[in-house]
Amino acid sequence: MSVVDAGLLIVGTIALWGGARLLVTGASRLAGAAGVSALVVGLTVVAFGTSAPEIAVSVEAAFAGRGDVSVGNVVGSNLFNLGVILGLIGVLSPFRVAETLVRRDALAMAAATAVAAVVLLNGAVSRLEGIILLALLGGYLGALGVAIQRASRADDGHPDTVDDGATVPPLDADEETPREIRSGLEGGRVLVGLLLVIGGGRVLIDAAVGLALAVGISEWAVGATIVAIGTSLPELVTSVVAIRRGDVGIAAGNVVGSNVFNVLGVLGIVAVVQPTAVDPAVFLGIAWLCVLTAFATVVLATGRRLTRLEGIALVTLGAGYWVVSVAL
C-alpha cells in the first residue's frame, strides 16, 4: 500500500504542475484581453479554483464525523498559504504590492480570519454560523465584482497592463487566429487546468493521508499538516508558476483570495452541510493563524512591498506551527 501511495504522490504532483501552468497561462491572457487586472483574476478564478480541494476534503471529513480533520484543514491551509507560499513569493521574487491588495483584500483577509476565530471560540461551528460566514463571503465577492467593473473602465484601451506592472500576453497577438477562437481556447485552457489541479490535488491528498495514518499521526495533526499542505499544493504550484511567468499579481492575489475563501467559504459550507465540533487544539491553530495574518497584513500595508527578509520571517513563522503541532 505504501508503494501505491508513493506512486500516487508522484502522479498527483505531475497533474498539479501541468494544471497550474495551463491555469495561469489561460487566466493571465484572458485578464489582459478583458482589461481585468491579474490581481483580480488571482483573487477570483485562480484563488477559488485552487481552493476546491479544501472544499472537497473538508466536507467529506465532516460527513465522516472527522471535524478535527475538516477544521484543521482550513486552519492549516491558511497557515501554509501565508507562511510558506506568500513567504516563498517574497524570497523568490520580492515585489511591490498593488494598492488594491492592501486597501481591500489584505484587510478582508484579516477581518475574515478574526470572524473565524470568534466562531471557533466555543470549539464548534453551527449551521447558523456557517450561513453567516457564507453571507460574508457573498459580500466580499460583491465587492470584487464592483472592482472588476472599475478596473475594466480604468484600463479601457490599455488591456495589457495589470496592477503589479506585469505584462499579460494579448489574445490577438496572433493575427491569423480570430479573437473569438483564441478566447475560447484560453477559456478551455483555464478549465482543463482547474480540473487537473483539483484532480491532482485530490489524488495527492489521498496518498498523503494514507501514508500519514499508517505511521499513527492523530486526526488533528493530519488535518492541520498533511491534509492542509496537500490541499494547499495547488496554491503553491500555481503561485510558483505565476512568479516564474512574472505574474506576481496572480500569485499574491491567489494567496489572499484563497485564505478569504477558506475561512468564509469552506468553513461556512462545512458548517451548513454538517455542523461539527473540534478538538481544543484548534485554539492554538487559530491563535497562530491570527498572529501570522496580522503580521502578513502589516507587512503588506507598510510600504506596500514584500521584501526577501519579510518572506523569510513568514516562512519561519509558518514552519514553526507545524513543528509545535506535531510535537503536541
Image: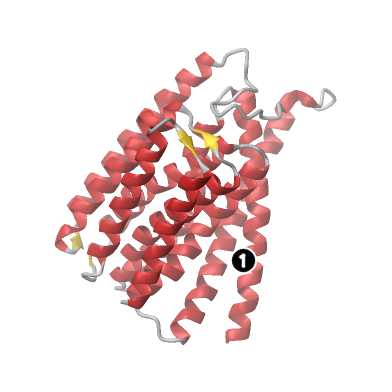
| Residue 264 on image: x %, y % | 31, 47
Q: Is residue 314 above or below residue 299?
A: below
Q: SS class of the residue under badge 1?
A: helix
Residue shown at 24%/68% (left/top)? 278
State the residue in front, 26 or 102.
Answer: 102
Scheme of image coloration: secondary structure
Q: Is 104 displayed left or right of 88 in the figure?
A: left
Q: Is 155 displayed left or right of 15 in the figure?
A: left
Whether residue 223 can be seen here: yes
| Quadrant housing the N terminus | bottom right
User: Where is mark 1, residue-wise?
Assistant: 12
| Residue 266 on image: x %, y % | 36, 53
| Quadrant housing the C terminus | bottom left
Q: Residues within 10 Å of mark 1 (few under 14, many from 20)?
A: many
| Residue 6 on image: x %, y % | 61, 78
Q: Is 82 displayed left or right of 248 in the figure?
A: left
Image quadrant of residue 221? bottom left
User: Which residue reaches farthest left?
Assistant: 122
State the residue in front, 182 or 97.
Answer: 97
Image quadrant of residue 37? top right
| Residue 72 on image: x %, y % | 34, 65
State the residue in front, 48 or 161.
Answer: 161
Residue shown at 48%/55% (left/top)? 84
Residue shown at 58%/79% (left/top)? 5
Label 1 sits on what residue type? Gly
Image quadrant of residue 174? top right
Whether residue 60 can be seen here: no
